[in-house]
Amino acid sequence: GKYGHAAIFHLVKHNTNQGAVDCMLCNLPDSTKDKPSLLRHQNVVTFFHEFGHIMHGLCSEGIGNSTRLAKCPRDFVEAPSQMLENWVWQKEILERLSKH
């Protein structure tokens, strides 16, 4: 069946030879051959929130240190995601990112 919620997955951990590779999985509305996929505002909020987790993982320095996602302090793990969510409440930003 379909995955019931949005999530990120770490496919390759950051190591001395390669940066991290992460994946975001979201259920978004389907497009058809006649109509593009139109996201509801809550879909955009969710996308930005999960993308915040991706950026947190990809931008963290070190290998398995205390700033990387699950290893960072619990009250900070959601901070990058919540910061990115702020952008979806600004009309100018949505207009710059929205295309059909």
Image (spheres, rainbow, N blue to C red):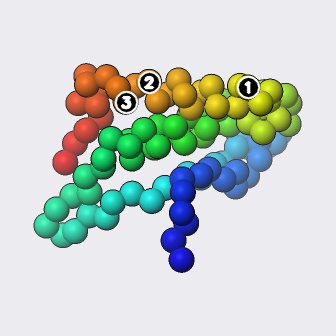
Asked if labels 2 and 3 touch by Cβ distance under 8 angstroms, the answer is: yes
84 over 42 or under it: above or below: above
Asked if labels 3 and 1 touch by Cβ distance under 8 angstroms, the answer is: no
Pointer 3 residue: 88
Give the farthest residue toward the bottom.
1
- Residue 97, image x, y percentages: 30, 34
Q: Mark 1 or 3, which is nearer the eye?
A: 1
Say which residue appears at 70% left-offset and 43% top-offset: 20
Name the quadrant containing residue 35. bottom left
Say which residue appears at 54% left-offset and 53% top-offset: 6
Mark 3: which amino acid? Val
Towards the viewer: 62 or 86: 86
Mark 1: which amino acid? Asp
Look at the numbered disc 1 and give the secondary structure of its residue: loop
Mark 2: which amino acid? Asn
- Specify few, some or many for label 3: CA neighbours under 10 Å numbering under 14, 14-19, or 20 or more: some
Pointer 2 residue: 86
- Residue 90, image x, y percentages: 31, 22
Pointer 1 residue: 75
Asked if labels 1 and 2 touch by Cβ distance under 8 angstroms, the answer is: no
Look at the numbered disc 2 and give the secondary structure of its residue: helix
Q: Is residue 96 visible?
A: no
